[in-house]
Image: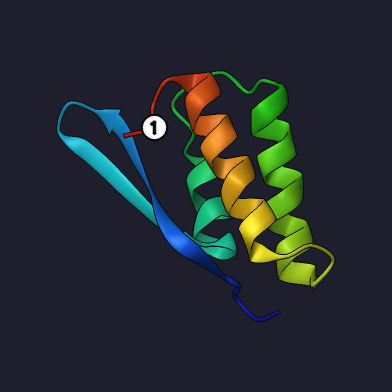
Amino acid sequence: MNDKMFPHPVRLKFAAERERVVRSAWEGLECLGDWPAGQGRQYRAALRCCRDALDGWTPPKKAMRAMIDAAREAHILQ
């Protein structure tokens, strides 16, 4: 499985002193494993999109957008 890089990094604010930058579908999956907020609909969509991007079923840009939507839902997008 080859990692798929996002067109732009996604910056997340997990806590006041903890920022995370997600640059690829693999990093997205790792980040979703440490998700600080609830696992709502956008979270599940991001999980699915990152997996699909790694498998070559969806473009990395779609996975990036899903990560952004999940971060907005969780109020952690920086």
Residue 55 placement (x, y as % from top left) = 79, 70
Query: Which residue, given by chain and number where applicable, does mark 1 sit on?
Result: 77
Residue 73 image-quadrant placement: top right
Instruction: Please give the count of numbered marks on the rendered protein.
Output: 1
Residue 26 image-quadrant placement: bottom right
Residue 11 placement (x, y as % from top left) = 34, 45
Residue at 67% from the left image edge and 20% from the top image edge: 40
Quarter of the figure with the C terminus: top left
- Extreme residue in the bottom direction: 2
Task: Left or right? Give the position of 3 relative to 48.
Answer: left
Residue at 54% from the left image edge and 53% from the top image edge: 28
Q: Say above or below: 33 vs 39.
A: below
What's the residue type where badge 1 is placed? Leu
Quarter of the figure with the N terminus: bottom right
Q: Circle 1 sits in a helix, a strand or a loop, which is it?
A: loop
- Extreme residue in the right direction: 57
Task: Left or right? Give the position of 48 relative to 70.
Answer: right
Q: Say above or below: 26 vs 64.
A: below
- Mark 1 crowd level (few <14, some 14–19, many ≥20, 10 Å Cα): some
* Depth order, front residue of 37/65: 65
* Depth order, front residue of 37/12: 12
Residue at 57% from the left image edge and 52% from the top image edge: 64
Task: Left or right? Give the position of 33 relative to 49.
Answer: left
The image's colour scheme reads: rainbow
Residue at 72% from the left image edge and 23% from the top image edge: 41
Residue 5 placement (x, y as % from top left) = 53, 71
Residue 45 placement (x, y as % from top left) = 73, 37
